[in-house]
Amino acid sequence: MRRRAWALALALVALLSACGPGAVKEKPFIEEFLAMDTAMRLTVYGQGAGEAAGLARERVLELEALLSVTDENSDICTANRNGGGALHADTAALLERALALCGETGGALDVSIYPVVRAWGFTTGAYRVPEEAELAALLERVDYTRISLEGTVLTLPEGMELDLGAVAKGWTGDRLMELLRREGITSAIVELGGNVQALGSKPDGSPWRVAIRNPAGEGNVGVVEVVDQAVDQAVVTSGGYQRYFEQDGEIYWHIIDP
């Protein structure tokens, strides 16, 4: 099989700093930390912002402990090792949604791709280009339609392993929006690597401005304005310029066509 990797949107996103007319004057509470193998930044405004941001950080770490494909104590790693088993409610809810997305995309997303991803070294750091025969054998284990999820009970065929990395941060962003609303927050933006999600608008009522980084050089290729009016607004991209390796003059990155 010839490996094909496509940058879905070619660039990660970065929140633009407020400047010029309409700049935010209210001082936010900012929580920065590393989780889910990426730098995260939560910017929360209003009364109780610090406490709400702290709860949001705890929620991210809680979900990471369940969804990580490399933490041997996580739900996903345990299920991969045991061929399934009972999942926590959060894990089961995300997997149910992910399987629906696999169907909606006709398998362009396939959460059973982990054996292939690991062969390339993208989760272990042991980068290499697998042989065609090895990839062909690994692809025999890739087929989301063979996954059985009954409530919170998962059953995997022998040799199949899951990786929810393609959907975990987006789903986590949704959970953070729910949490912040419960805490009475009306203005916030969360940056979970390439996933940027907005709650409300800036405190002055103006839209959030999210820059799309140029994947081939310096600067940005554009700016997207988002404001949460009726539903949460998110800007989500992925690119091959941070997680990649080079071998024999060829560059290989982590976005893989199953």
Image (cartoon, rainbow, N blue to C red):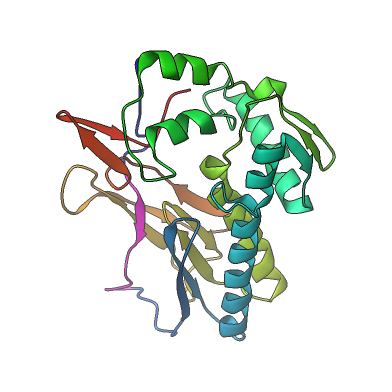
**Placement of 134 over or under 255, stated as above or below:** above
Which of the 4 image quarters holds residue 97? top right
Quick check: is 16 in the magenta stretch?
A: yes
**Placement of 245 over or under 40, stated as above or below:** above
**Placement of 235 over or under 127, stated as above or below:** below
> Left or right of 184: which side holds 125?
left
Residue 8 seen by the camera:
no
Pick the front one: 56 or 116: 116
Q: Where residue 192 sits in the image (x, y, percent)?
A: 47, 58
Q: Where residue 96 sits in the image (x, y, percent)?
A: 73, 38
Pick the front one: 217 or 138: 138
Q: Where residue 224 sits in the image (x, y, percent)?
A: 37, 51
Quick check: is 62 in the magenta stretch?
A: no
> Left or right of 253: which side holds 198?
right
- The quadrant of the image that shows the N terminus is top left
> Left or right of 197: which side holds 84?
right
Magenta-highlighted residues: 11-21
Q: Where residue 76 sits in the image (x, y, percent)?
A: 65, 45
Pick the front one: 17 or 154: 154
| Residue at 61% in and 36% down | 162
| Residue at 40% in and 55% down | 225
**Number of numbered labels in the structure image:** 0
Residue 2 seen by the camera:
yes
Which of the 4 image quarters holds residue 6? top left
Q: Main secondary structure of the magenta part?
A: loop
| Residue at 14% in and 29% down | 249
Outermost residue to the right: 151
